[in-house]
Amino acid sequence: MEDKEQTSLGSRPMVGGEGPQSYAQNSSIQKKVVEDTKELIHVAIIEKLGLQYITNSGSSNSTFRIADLGCSVGPNTFFAVQNIIDAIELKYHKTYKGNKINPEFQVFFNDHADNDFNTLFKLLPPSRNYFTNAVPGSFHGRLFPKSSLHFVHSSCSLHWLSKVPKEVVDSKSPAWNKGSIICTGLVKEVLDAYSNQFNNDMESYLTARAQEIVGGGLMVLIFPVLPDGIPMAQTSTGKAMELLYSCLNDLAILGLVKQEKVDSFNIPFYFPNAEEMVRIVERNGYFIVEKIQEYLSKSPVISKDVQFLITSHLRAATEGIIKEHFGLGIVEELFNYFQKKLTDDDHTFTKEYTPEIEYLFIVLKRKAFDR
Amino acid sequence: MEDKEQTSLGSRPMVGGEGPQSYAQNSSIQKKVVEDTKELIHVAIIEKLGLQYITNSGSSNSTFRIADLGCSVGPNTFFAVQNIIDAIELKYHKTYKGNKINPEFQVFFNDHADNDFNTLFKLLPPSRNYFTNAVPGSFHGRLFPKSSLHFVHSSCSLHWLSKVPKEVVDSKSPAWNKGSIICTGLVKEVLDAYSNQFNNDMESYLTARAQEIVGGGLMVLIFPVLPDGIPMAQTSTGKAMELLYSCLNDLAILGLVKQEKVDSFNIPFYFPNAEEMVRIVERNGYFIVEKIQEYLSKSPVISKDVQFLITSHLRAATEGIIKEHFGLGIVEELFNYFQKKLTDDDHTFTKEYTPEIEYLFIVLKRKAFDR
């Protein structure tokens, strides 16, 4: 999985296939993020990529290896990858003027092993100019051989944690998160538990990538962050999750799910802020921050028209984790109920009271190391 | 697809998943081939693999890249790959005595894009010592960057042609194959058409691999060949196919499929003989034949006990191609009917009259080239 959701969650895969509930049909928000960052990535490659780090870059015998980590099933990952390749080709063209030297591109689409890679392969652009690979596994661990990648991209994936911090579902812990299914940011102990998990996950992620990326190679990370001083509870993502929680509670009262099941359910995602992310990168030590930029992805105004969008996106992203925890039977009922509550509720998502999610765009360069 | 069948056929994927009709559950014949060739591959690696061709092979920073072409969904491909890795590790151990230098292994599982890679990933051995990749696409074309592979394995796949030769389904051609769905070897024009297609396909295959394999890299190919002087029609594979054809004809008489559909159906596979294969490799020119060996894979005696095996293997391999040509509706009926005919027929497959299929084991080394 490693989803791509504004209103999202889940450590189980996005909904596969191409049906009406699928991620492939319900990832317009993530597509927007890809479009928003297109120019930023282009500029980063032109300005920051050093071709001298690519073996044989000046000959016709060089391979440029790109990984998209947390790719889901497409099609967004294909747009992102093509944008990266177009920029690299332009960089080659500028560097080796007139020599018509282009590398061969090898692209690695990574996501959890239970991602629907069959659909990814079905949706592949037929006329692509790269060699295609799917790489199954968690990006919190090693996925590639040493010094084998030149460019890593990960969009809307890193806010997903490797697991729910165990304290938050432990009724004996001060960090027990009874009364919520997310890190609202309103309870310090819960916030600390989630933050620790995010820090540990990022440290694992960066250390794995440090092995895999060549010295001088670039990594572009894009993920949602909290605006300054705004807790998760006040964001549209937070509000959608709280609404989902209230639906689960109602279903528990109706006897359709067990209350203990609801109490032990947390969704393992966390939005850091920009400073926290920079501290993590600096403490890790393997990468230089080449560029960091917060930007607002203009999300659609929340109106009746987009209520369906909220529900469908939320469902595409969370169905897997909900099935895993509660069983298959609840899913249809839950999201119908969610849709109804959303329609009945005119106030929760009004624009004035819902800060927009910001995204962090960060370009890291692997420090050159001894070979 | 690129199947792995003794009694087999089809240019559509093997049956996916892990159900009773799946390739994963119906590939014991291919498993036997993997077991039979284990020792041969081991010896080939110890005797023929030159570690000097591997970049940084003497340091701890080297990557050894292995591709299995026509892998299907597992588990046979995992046994084959592990065997290769074990032998390479032994070779490293012998070469760099006591230095405990081992490369990192990167494995590429290739098959057609409509292969069930989700099942492949589900069946992956949890404790594997290699980085995993799936590569979708036809191995008759390029799949990997230049000089990026050190070892290529392909077992029971190369006898599948990229397409049915067009002459054999053209009623105006002297090579029209009316009255059969395979290359029986009994009609010269049909045999020539199939042989030409195989030659063209192998030329494409070898030329693509020549680009992808480093100078000195090895390629092990294993596929069924015809025993000297025996036409396909006399082999168990040929006989099973002829029986399938008679079932299709019967269904046409019953009006369940159209006769034209049966007449335009051919299964694109071809068993060469060893000399033919050597001629193709020599004409291509990029590889040296390091070793060639024909061997008999003792197939189970055909008895009532294994009639189910024949049907289930045949079905796992051909269901895709039959669905594609005739539509989904016919499959269940056809194989029930096939099973019944097989049970009623005590003579066709008696051991005395059915020559066993031979396999060709061939080790090719990529000629060293200028860099």
Image: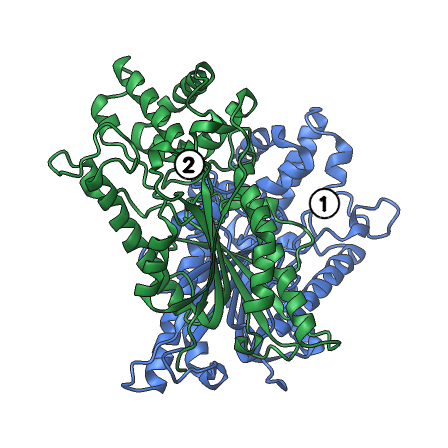
Chain colours: A green, B blue
Give the residue at the far left of this rendering: A172
| Chain letter behind tag 1 | B
Q: Is residue B260 above or below residue B124?
A: above
Q: Say whether residue A241 is left or right of residue A191.
A: right
Whether residue A279 can be seen here: yes
Q: Residue at label 2?
A: A8
Q: Left or right: where does residue A130 sit relative to residue B219?
A: right
Q: Is residue B276 visible?
A: no
Q: Amino acid at mark 1?
A: Ser
Q: How many marks?
A: 2
Give whichever of A75, A192 is nearer the camera. A192
Secondary structure beneath dot 2 equals loop
Q: Quadrant of residue A54?
A: bottom right
How crowded pointer 1 is (Cα within 10 Å; few <14, some 14-19, many 20+) is rated as: many
Asked if residue A331 lies left or right of residue B310, the reply is left
Specify whether B287 is left or right of A289: right
Q: Residue at x 30, y 35 (%)?
A: A184
Spot occupied by residue A301 in the image (x, y as percentages of width and height):
54, 29
User: Where is residue B262 drawn, in percent x and y?
Assistant: 73, 37
Q: Estimate the x, y position of residue A144 in percent, counting from the top left.
A: 43, 64
Q: What's under tag 2, amino acid-wise?
A: Ser
Indicate which disc residue B303 carries: none
Spatial separation of the CA atoms under disc 2 and disc 1: 56 Å
**Any mark on residue B180, and which?**
1
Seen at 63% across and 49% down, the residue is: B11
Residue drawn at point x = 75 percent, y = 76 percent: A98
Callout 2 environment at 10 Å: few (<14), some (14 to 19), or many (20+)? many
Q: Is residue B199 above or below residue B315?
A: below
